[in-house]
Image: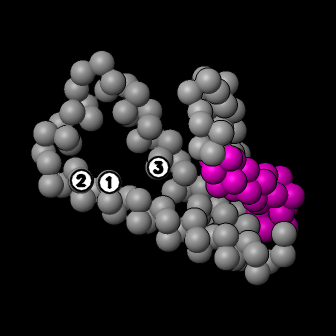
Amino acid sequence: MTKIVWKIYYWLILFVSIFVLGVFVFILATDINEFNSIFEGKRAFTNLYDIFFILLFFISVLGLRGFIYSKSYFIKELWKFIFFMMLVEYFGNIIYSFNDYDKLEYIIDSAVTLPILYALYQYVYKMNDLWKNNDD
């Protein structure tokens, strides 16, 4: 993809992510019982798992920005970990939820996740000049 397409993709993902996060925070802020239910009951671990990967997704968006604008954020080893965890999450969702996935949901999830995975791979493993200053 050209840089302009990547930039459009980045800003679109950033805008949608912030909007969804804002809606989520608004719902939790207006209903304290909903907030408390995140950490209680049988789904507590699943909810914490989801929160972890949502945060990881937001950090990945920063990696996407680093890839597009050739900026190094944090250290290369952290991005290797994030890339690996995003791969685990993506393929885990496919394997674990394959029967539950609606085809449209699968297509949307792939359309969002695969370009980020590609960008993170390029960012970590192919942009070595970017990380030379951090390796010293």
Residue extending farthest bottom: 4
Labels 2 and 3: the sequence-earlier one: 2
For the residue marked with disc 2, what is the amino acid?
Ile
The residue that mark 2 highlights is: 27
- Taking the spot 63% from the left edge, 45% from the top edge, the residue there is 104
Front position among marks 3 and 1? 1
Q: In the image, which residues are magenta?
A: 107-131
- State whether the magenta stretch is mostly helix, strand or loop: helix
Viewer-nearest of discs 2 and 3: 2
Element type at mark 2:
helix
Query: Which residue matches tag 3?
Result: 55
Pointers 2 and 3 in contact (C-beta within 8 Å) = no
In the image: residue 59, left or right of residue 50: right
- Label 3 – label 1 distance at C-alpha: 13 Å
Q: Secondary structure at mark 3?
A: helix
Which circle's residue, 3 or 1, is located before the other in the chain?
Answer: 1
Q: Quadrant of the C terminus?
A: bottom right
Residue most toward the front? Answer: 103
On screen, 59 above or below 67? above
Q: Residues within 10 Å of mark 2 (few under 14, many from 20)?
A: few
Q: Which mark is residue 24?
A: 1
- Image quadrant of residue 37? top left
Is residue 119 shown left or right of residue 36? right
Residue type pointed to by label 1:
Phe
